Image: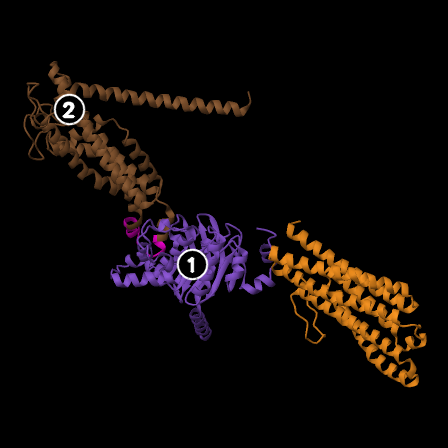
Amino acid sequence: MNNTRKNKIKDQAFKALGMLFTLFGVSILVVLIYNILRIGFTRINWDFLNSLPSRNPEDAGIYTAIIGTVDLMLLTVIFAIPIGVGAGIYLEEYSKKSKLSSLLEINISNLAGVPSIIYGLLGLGIFVRYFNFGGSILAGSLTLSLLILPIIIVATREAIKAVSPSLKEASFALGASKWQTISNVVLPSSLGGIITGIILSLSRAIGETAPLIVVGAMAYVPFVPHSLFDAFSVLPMQIFNWTTRPQQGFAVAASAAIIILLLITFIMNGIAVYFRNRWQKKLK
Amino acid sequence: MGKEKNENVIESSLKRKYKLQAKDVNVFYGDFQAIKEISMDIKSNSVTAFIGPSGCGKSTFLRLFNRMNDYVDDFRMEGKIFIDGQNINKKKVNVELLRKQVGMVFQKPNPFPKSIFENVAYGLKIQGLKDKTFLEERVESSLKQVALWDEVKDNLNKSALTLSGGQQQRLCIARTLAVEPSVILMDEPTSALDPLSTAKIEELLHELKKKYTIVIVTHNMQQAGRISDYTAFFYLGEIIEFDKTNKIFTNPEKKQTENYITGRFG
Amino acid sequence: MTNLDQYRESLKQSGLEMFQLCEKQMLKSKEAFLTHDSDLAEEVIHTENRVNALDLKIDRDCERFIALHTPVAGDLRFVLALRKINFDLERVGDHAFGVAKYIIEIDTPIDSKLLENLRFVEMYESALSMLDDIKEAYINDDTKKARKVYKKDKVLNKININAFKVISEEVKKEPNLIDQYLLLFSIIKKIERIGDLITNIAEEIIFYREAEILKHQKKKKVRKPGK
């Protein structure tokens, strides 16, 4: 058969294959969510959200875990964003291009791929032991900040790189200083990419369990943490803990908690995507 | 001693006569020499065109006058550049202040992704000028100078990116004019535009040269002929010929110049 | 060869054609006059149409060249010079046509002695050699050759001035031949005009090659090296 027919068939085949793979991925997701909902949906009520964890599956609630997750995220954000975005801006705009700086760039990208448990160990050594913060929210959030810092730095750099150099030229040609150009032209244009990077990194952080275990997040925290130095728990930990228990009631509770966790994740992502889209519109 | 004194008198009166001057300028990018021993004097309120094949140093030389080459790695310059008799490469010169005196318009229109008003006011705002009335007046007068005011006066808050290519370029010119420079450098300002927009901008230049000194790099020979008073022909980093445009286009001195402008090479 | 060069070359060829045409017209008119050949004169009269047509064609082609190619420098000076050269050549052809018309009108041949006195043949041949010179100068872009015609033109002017004297004397001697003499005088004036036209063409060629404008100046000029 001739080339045109061959190409057409290849075209159709690729299309079909792509659809198949997409369907595969989507259907797994659907099955997962359906099962979770089936098991845990009925368990969700105000008590569940408001109760502390308990040895009794009927009384157990995720109040501590939710507070822990929210607090942790907030603190992580406060630490990681200024440092990450600041470092990204510095590395992209101010540092001179040299062998050293390209080495730095490669290594930061590598850090993003380092297994999270290693960050846990790092956090244990520095924050828990050396600074003596103990197994607290402070130590946990600092550790998570370290974890997501490389992601934010890389995302910031990429977003800044994507800003057309002609815009920067125009700003300089009008007599703007470097910082004025960055704050008036570069950052507004790259904010979309930076926010996306932050979203991605937070989505990752919210599900982290291993490093938090190492740092000392506990699975059974039957009280609400009041200060930064208190012990804490997070949703993934709570879920993990419940799934290890033999009682069926805990399995149901775990599913319910998963639903809540997914909900929080989706809402977070949704808000961030909404803001990103609004920003993109402004640029158009 | 007397001779020295005479030369200084001559030099300084030349400096007053010419708005822009280059003396024995060499430019290097690392090992590559982009500009070879160029000296040039440009009069006030004139339009000077730089023509020549691609990569022969026209843009590089143009950018010496507002020090935009400073951002390029391994850029190195020898020689002197004077504006109003002042050497602009001296350490004490404030580059940002220089760029308010010497504006630049680029080949591809590059309005900021902001509103039309914000674009034109940008250069003023970064100087710290905040007074609303003042800004509005300046924006209006700048837009009027580029014949854009009537087209956009009801939509100043619309994004600049909604304008057509020709309008965007005129906006960029207005943005440059708002800062009230005395020199405008233009790097192929109409090469990305359609003929009608090009014609509008050329008409604009005829008006602008009454108030400003304009230097324009162009690949379009006919454009150079239409709008410039003086033309410099660049080739491989050197100036082959620099003279009144009329002379260059009717009877150039150098054969190379004639071959280039008649389209027989380059 | 670029498109521009091709177009310019074809314009140059048309100019050469015009030279050759007008040269032939002049030759035939001289021949017809001296041998009193009215058939030959008729030929010249018919060919005038061709001269006019070629004149129009060259004019239009020059206009097209300017509009489409926007020539500058040497190309521009070439086409501007060609337009004027074409115009002058058309007038040369016109004068040759005028001479031929006279031949038809004169019944009897002119007294050869008189023609000798007037140096008529010398004048005509001088003009023809000037035309040949200037044609060569045009073909070869030779400004040296172009400048040669100024000297020869002086001869034509001398003969013209002298002719006035000779003819006014002859008219006093034989007043009944005044018609003939007046016609003869006209023809001599025409040849003198042809000489002027050819010096115009020389100026155009020098302008085109050297960008030097010679017209309205004294003809004595310091030589400048060509490009």
Hey, which quadrant is residue B139 in on the image?
bottom left
Q: Could you tell me which residue is drawn at 86 percent across and 75 percent down?
A: C184
Which image quadrant: the N terminus of chain A? Answer: top right
Q: Position of residue A16 (x, y in %)?
A: 40, 22
Instruction: Identify by letter the chain in orange.
Output: C
Instruction: Identify by letter the chain in brown.
Output: A
Hey, which quadrant is residue A76 in on the image?
top left
Give the distance between the C-alpha atoms of the residues marked 1 and 2, in whole angstroms. 64 Å
The one of C185 and C10 positioned closer to us in this rendering: C185
Task: Describe residue C114's horizontal placement relative to residue A174 as left or right.
Answer: right
The answer to whether A93 is drawn above or below residue A15 in the figure is: below
Q: Position of residue C85 (x, y in %)?
A: 72, 64
- Are there few (<14), some (14-19), or many (20+) residues within 10 Å of tag 2? many
Tell me, what hue is chain B?
purple
Q: Are marks 1 and 2 on the same chain?
A: no
Which amino acid type is marked by label 1?
Leu
Q: Position of residue A42 (x, y in %)?
A: 13, 21
Which image quadrant: the C terminus of chain A? Answer: top left
Range of magenta residues: A171-183
The answer to whether B3 is drawn above or below residue A60 in the figure is: below
What secondary structure is the stretch in magenta mostly built from? helix
The answer to whether C38 is drawn above or below residue A247 in the figure is: below
Protein chain holding label 1: B
Which amino acid type is marked by label 2?
Ala
Q: Secondary structure at mark 1?
A: strand
Protein chain holding label 2: A
Q: Could you tell me which residue is drawn at 9 percent across and 29 percent down?
A: A231
The residue to which callout 2 is attached is A257
The one of B82 and B32 positioned closer to us in this rendering: B82
The residue to which callout 1 is attached is B185
Q: Could you tell me which residue is drawn at 87 percent across and 67 percent down?
A: C30
